[in-house]
């Protein structure tokens, strides 16, 4: 008598593994794989193999096979070879200025905000949600605010100049010059030098000649002071003190509250305080700053610029022009 061997039916997990084998992508050098097909497609493929299954069950089976639903994770930072060297240099220079009594400020442009009855990220405790426009279109807003912030590391005070125009090097230098000329700002033991800590990009980009020219004209020459500028390495802007000591506190203060007018925006900034004694002032800058202004080669050649030996692209000094005659 011949006994027929029954064909063993594969389990549903094994069948799913066979289905996705041809649709797995990944890096062959590391153990990182992903499935290129949707749950609906995989479910239909298993139905053709005589399994009664839906997308929800496929999801559970994929988890058993160690697959999860992930989005991209923004955690990788470009690492410049001189990154650590620049951090050490900034630490030494900052300590030197603070010990000698010279001013040290951290500057940057905060995220631009639409002004009007538009949604503002965040949530607040209230009895009913605040109704705002369904769309965040610039055409339906009153304008766009460009807040340029200055954080005084010595006195732990902030100043924000809210522009209504473009974020340009001229605007950045103008905001710092306005802060320096403010008669109500805190004074320092010595005011013949100024250290500015800023990012490597944005309106105060380390490669912008326009930024250097405006600092020369509006700060070094206008007030007769020596201005030293240190840029944080590319991709390291979160180490800029203004980000976590000023901008984060402003964002928490107006979270979930529509910025319906420029005056409302200024009020929220001025009301920002912390238990450590942070005080913030805010001013509206209605002057128009045109973008895309090219520099004159003569302006660049006339810069009284001295680059530091350590990371010269990121560290340099602008001294007042010496008047001849």
Image: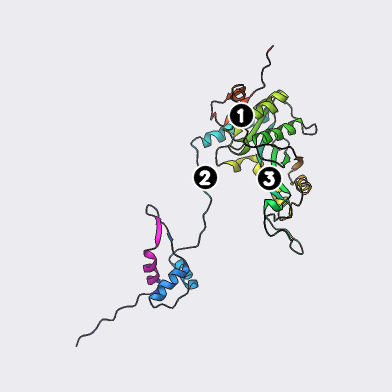
Which residue is nearer to you in this view: 292 or 169? Answer: 292
Q: In terms of secondary structure, where does tag 1 sit?
A: loop
Residue matched to label 1: 295
Q: In terms of secondary structure, where does tag 2 sit?
A: loop
| Furthest-front residue in this view | 139
Q: Are the two marked residues, 2 and 1, in contact with CB atoms closer than 8 angstroms?
A: no
Coordinates of residue 308 in the picture (x, y in percent): 56, 26
The structure residue drawn at horizontal position 45% and vertical position 67%, both measured from the top left corner, is 62
Q: Are the two marked residues, 3 and 2, in contact with CB atoms closer than 8 angstroms?
A: no
Residue matched to label 3: 247
The first of marks 3 and 1 along the sequence is 3
Q: What are the residue bounds of the magenta stretch?
A: 14-26
Badge 2 density bin: few <14, some 14–19, many ≥20, Cα 10 Å: few
Coordinates of residue 100 in the picture (x, y in percent): 68, 27
Coordinates of residue 280 in the picture (x, y in percent): 75, 42
Residue matched to label 2: 77
Cα distance in 3D space between marks 3 and 2:
21 Å
| Furthest-bottom residue in this view | 1
């Amino acid at each position: 008598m011949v006994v027929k061997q029954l064909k063993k039916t594969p389990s549903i997990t094994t069948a799913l593994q066979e289905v996705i084998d041809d649709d797995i992508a990944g890096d062959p050098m590391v153990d990182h794989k992903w499935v290129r097909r949707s749950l609906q497609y995989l479910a239909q493929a298993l139905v053709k193999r005589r399994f009664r299954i839906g997308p929800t069950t496929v999801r559970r089976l994929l988890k058993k096979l160690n697959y999860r639903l992930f989005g991209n994770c923004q955690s990788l930072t470009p690492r410049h070879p001189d990154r650590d060297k620049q951090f050490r240099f900034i630490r030494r220079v900052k300590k030197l200025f603070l010990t000698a009594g010279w001013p040290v400020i951290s500057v940057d442009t905060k995220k631009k905000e639409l002004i009007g009855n538009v949604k503002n990220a965040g949530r607040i405790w209230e009895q009913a949600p605040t109704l705002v426009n369904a769309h965040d279109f610039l055409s339906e807003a009153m304008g766009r605010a460009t807040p340029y912030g200055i954080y005084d590391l010595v006195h732990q005070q902030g100043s924000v100049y809210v522009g209504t125009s473009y974020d340009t090097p001229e605007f950045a230098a103008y905001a710092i010059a306005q802060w320096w000329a403010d008669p109500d700002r805190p004074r320092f033991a010595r005011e013949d030098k100024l250290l500015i800590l800023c990012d490597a990009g944005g309106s105060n980009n380390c490669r912008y000649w326009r930024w250097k020219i405006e600092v020369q004209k509006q700060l070094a020459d206008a007030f007769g002071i020596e201005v030293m500028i240190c840029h944080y390495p590319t991709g390291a802007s979160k180490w800029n003190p203004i980000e976590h000591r000023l901008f984060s506190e402003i964002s928490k203060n107006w979270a979930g509250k529509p910025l319906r007018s420029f005056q409302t925006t200024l009020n929220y900034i001025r009301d920002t305080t912390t238990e450590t004694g942070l005080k913030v002032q805010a001013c509206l800058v209605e002057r128009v700053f045109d973008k895309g202004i090219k520099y004159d080669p003569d302006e660049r050649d006339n810069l009284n610029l001295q680059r530091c030996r350590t990371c010269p692209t990121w560290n340099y000094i602008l001294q007042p022009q010496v008047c001849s005659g």
